[in-house]
Amino acid sequence: MKIPVIRQFFQNNTPEQLETTLEVLEAFCEFRGVSEAEVDVAGELITNICGALEVHASVQSGVLEKDALNAFGQKVMGSIDR
């Protein structure tokens, strides 16, 4: 998870575009010939896209972009610490 990447995805893509990309990456990970390294890269992208989608949802409900990004980062870091 990289907050600057999530910010870029949030600022430059609609939720619909992110959902479509997410579907493609998930399908890519299911191909038999995909290496573990490729799955790792796709997984990192999936995490960042999911973060951007969550930020979109938070901003739409009235949260400031900066606060939404920080909240997502704290949520992820909190789940790692457990």
Image (cartoon, rainbow, N blue to C red):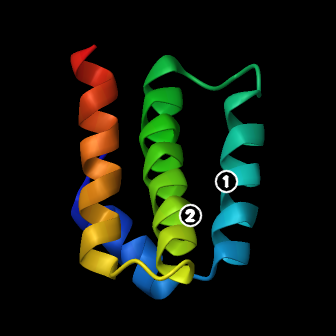
The N terminus appears in which quarter of the rendering?
top left
Picture coordinates of residue 42, whole percent (x, y): 52, 40
- 37 or 79: nearer the eye? 79
For the residue carrying disc 1, how many other residues have a C-alpha within 10 Å: few (<14), some (14-19), or many (20+)?
A: some
- Residue at the spot of label 1: 22
Count the marks: how many?
Answer: 2
Of label 2 and label 1, which has the lower sequence position? 1
Residue 4 placement, left or right of 44: left
Picture coordinates of residue 78, whole percent (x, y): 26, 30
Residue at 76% over, 27% down: 30
Quadrant assignment, res 35: top right
- Residue at the spot of label 2: 53
Residue 18 placement, left or right of 27: left
Query: How far apart in space, not on screen, are marks 2 and 1 (Cα)?
Result: 10 Å
In the displayed image of the protein, which residue is found farthest to the front? 62
Q: Secondary structure at mark 2?
A: helix
Marks 2/1 in contact by CB < 8 Å: the verdict is yes
For the residue carrying disc 2, how many other residues have a C-alpha within 10 Å: few (<14), some (14-19), or many (20+)?
A: many
